[in-house]
């Protein structure tokens, strides 16, 4: 069986070939269209000049119809070319992601960065070189937000995670379908804006437009007026006053209710969104899935009469096409003669009355699928990674051969945090891997709660609220120093430990902004307090004296360390976690590497 890389390369090559073939076909059609136009016009002129005007007119009509047919055909090929190009780009990006070149992807999720969130900043969930940038393929507004929610919000219970795991496994195996589903959202060059306005619009309808009397009047008046127009030109017994009166009456009707135009424009602004929703829903509804989570999503895709959602969205899409004609230069006359705006409003209000209340649910279903499809990438690209076991007891994360999912050449370590050893104290010299280990555990827990596989051979954890204090900085706009910002974050963790039943914390070099004596005393008190409250977590520190907490806590707090070694006068790290307190230091060596005369310092 071919691996992910071979599959991506094979499909990218296939779509590259298809793209080249379509480009050649489109170029040939353009040449044929031009030749047809020139030859047809030349023949028509020749026939006209040779006193065969009827034949010339017929030739001109034939040329015009043929030309329009080629234009429609040409446009269909252009649409297909655009879709194939999107698929090619998706497989090309998949290859880039697989070989570690994903940091150039444009959507970094920068708009989701939130310094106040308990852990997203410290674990690099959003922004440049983030987890979001690595896996996100969601394109719709709510799809991106759904993936963000999966990474930042703890599910209600473990059963939901297990259902999502099955859904992600199935989507991962459906590679071709998944990429075609994602491609539908990328066929437009416009940004897909928030659907909140149109969802709110769809929830309520104006019953006035659905009154039988108004509908009959709106249908009958244009027929009567146009009948008078035809009779005026074809007979002598109908004067111009009749069609003129009908024209003026209909113009006055359109002048009443100026909000109608704003309502139609508001719907038209979502034209691209609606067409994309239609295509994505159709892809999903026509596919059979076995996973219970996906089947439950499909059950939401019907209106009150049991009609499929994509059929209803297609109807709305057709109505937006009708509204698009309002931008035509001849629309004013057509609008008055046909009461076009009112016809559109009647159709829209009828659609809202029947299906409008479900639109938000349908859009959220698409968003959920986009989020799942993004997470499915992890399983397809890394089939050797394990789906975590979500346990119901109060144990913390436990893993064998665990690595950081974003690091290409990651080092694997084993950890176990439970009631017997609820806090791990990690010591080690600079750059030895302490902070990376904390982030490794945190990011894998985030993936576990999202329903995705984790970078490990075995991984289990219970449902726990994650809090971290690793990367804090000052806030000049609010006059907050980095030390005070750190205190605020630690205060948040302490308060949460008193209210949250199950809390997991990650603390990296706490109280850095004070002297060593206060730092040691403060860290010792904090770790004891968190341990007493029943919280679990990990603490990295250079303060070796904190190692005494293992004995004082009767090994409820455990010591682990990283170490370095020197070879050919160079420093090296193996990033392997070992039991006990660190016995090595490298600060002076690093200072010497910076060009500082260490011997002079020691004098």
Image (spheres, rainbow, N blue to C red):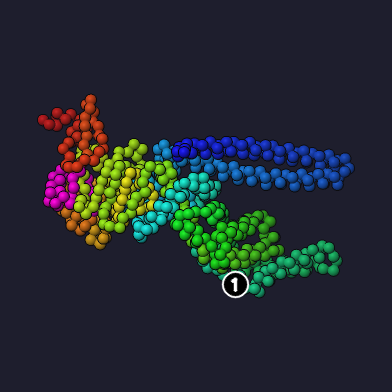
User: 281 or 57, which lies in front?
Assistant: 281
Tell me, yes or no, whether the highlighted magenta stretch contains residue 111.
Answer: no
Q: Which residues are magenta?
A: 536-560
Q: Position of residue 567 (x, y in %)?
A: 22, 27
Q: Is residue 178 visible?
A: yes
Q: Image check: 380 left or right of 60?
A: left
On the image, numbered disc 1 is attached to which residue?
208
Tell me, yes or no, whether the highlighted magenta stretch contains residue 539.
Answer: yes
Q: Residue at x 27, y 41 (%)?
A: 413
Q: Position of residue 563 (x, y in %)?
A: 21, 37
- Residue extending furthest toward the front: 1
- Neighbor class of circle 1 (other Cα within 10 Å; few <14, some 14-19, many 20+) is few
Looking at the rendered structure, the number of numbered marks drawn on it comes to 1
Q: Residue at x 45, y 38 (%)?
A: 3
Q: Is residue 593 visible?
A: no
- Residue extending furthest toward the top: 568
Above or below, comparing residue 599 to residue 402 in the picture = above
Q: Residue at x 74, y 45 (%)?
A: 66
Above or below, comparing residue 495 to residue 7 in the picture = below
User: 138 or 12, which lies in front?
Assistant: 12
Q: Position of residue 521 (x, y in %)?
A: 14, 50
SS under mark 1: helix
């Amino acid at each position: 069986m071919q691996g992910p890389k071979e599959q991506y390369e094979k499909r990218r090559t296939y779509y590259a070939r298809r793209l080249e073939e379509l480009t050649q076909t489109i170029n040939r059609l353009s040449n044929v269209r031009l030749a047809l136009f020139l030859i047809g016009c030349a023949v028509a002129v020749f026939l006209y000049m040779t006193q065969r005007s009827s034949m010339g007119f017929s030739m001109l009509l034939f040329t015009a119809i043929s030309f329009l047919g080629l234009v429609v055909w040409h446009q269909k090929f252009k649409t297909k070319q655009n879709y194939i190009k999107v698929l090619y780009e998706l497989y090309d990006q998949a290859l880039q992601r697989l070989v570690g070149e994903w940091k150039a992807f444009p959507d970094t999720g920068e708009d989701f960065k939130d310094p106040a969130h308990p852990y997203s900043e410290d674990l690099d969930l959003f922004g440049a070189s983030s987890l979001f940038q690595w896996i996100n393929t969601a394109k719709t507004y709510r799809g991106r937000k759904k993936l963000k929610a999966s990474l930042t919000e703890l599910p209600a219970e473990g059963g939901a995670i297990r259902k999502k795991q099955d859904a992600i496994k199935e989507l991962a195996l459906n590679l071709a379908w998944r990429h075609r589903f994602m491609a539908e959202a990328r066929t437009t060059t416009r940004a897909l804006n928030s659907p909140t306005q149109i969802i709110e619009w769809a929830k309520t309808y104006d019953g006035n437009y659905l009154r039988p009397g108004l509908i009959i009047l709106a249908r009958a008046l244009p027929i009567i007026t146009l009948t008078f127009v035809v009779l005026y030109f074809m007979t002598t017994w109908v004067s111009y006053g009749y069609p003129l009166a009908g024209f003026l009456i209909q113009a006055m009707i359109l002048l009443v209710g100026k909000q109608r135009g704003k309502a139609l424009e508001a719907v038209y602004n979502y034209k691209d969104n609606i067409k994309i929703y239609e295509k994505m829903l159709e892809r999903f509804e026509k596919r059979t899935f076995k996973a219970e989570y996906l089947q439950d999503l499909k059950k939401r895709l019907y209106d009150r009469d049991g009609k499929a959602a994509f059929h209803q969205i297609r109807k709305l899409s057709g109505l937006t096409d009708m509204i698009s004609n309002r931008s035509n230069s001849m629309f004013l006359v057509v609008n008055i003669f046909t009461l076009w705006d009112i016809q559109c409003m009647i159709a829209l209000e009828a659609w809202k009355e029947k299906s409008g209340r479900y639109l938000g649910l349908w859009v959220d279903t698409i968003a959920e699928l986009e989020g799942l499809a993004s997470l499915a990438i992890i399983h397809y690209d890394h089939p050797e990674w394990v789906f975590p076991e979500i346990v119901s007891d109060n144990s913390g994360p436990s893993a064998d051969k665990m690595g950081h999912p974003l690091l290409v050449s990651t080092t694997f370590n084993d950890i176990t945090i439970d009631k017997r050893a609820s806090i791990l104290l990690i010591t080690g010299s600079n750059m030895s891997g302490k902070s990376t280990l904390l982030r490794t555990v945190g990011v894998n827990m985030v993936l576990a709660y999202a329903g995705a596989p984790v970078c490990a051979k075995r991984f289990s954890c219970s449902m726990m609220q994650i809090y971290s204090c690793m990367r804090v900085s000052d806030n000049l706009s609010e006059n907050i120093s980095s030390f005070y910002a750190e205190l605020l974050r630690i205060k948040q963790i302490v308060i949460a430990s008193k209210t949250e039943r199950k809390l997991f914390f990650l603390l990296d070099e706490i109280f850095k902004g004070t002297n060593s004596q206060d730092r040691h005393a403060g860290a010792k008190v904090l770790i004891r307090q968190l341990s007493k409250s029943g919280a679990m977590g990990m603490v990295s520190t250079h303060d070796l004296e904190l190692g005494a907490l293992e004995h004082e806590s009767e090994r409820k707090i455990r010591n682990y360390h990283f170490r370095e070694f020197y070879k050919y006068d160079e420093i090296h790290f193996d990033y392997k976690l070992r039991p006990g307190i660190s016995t090595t230091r490298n600060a002076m060596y690093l200072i010497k590497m910076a060009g500082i005369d260490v011997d002079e310092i020691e004098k």
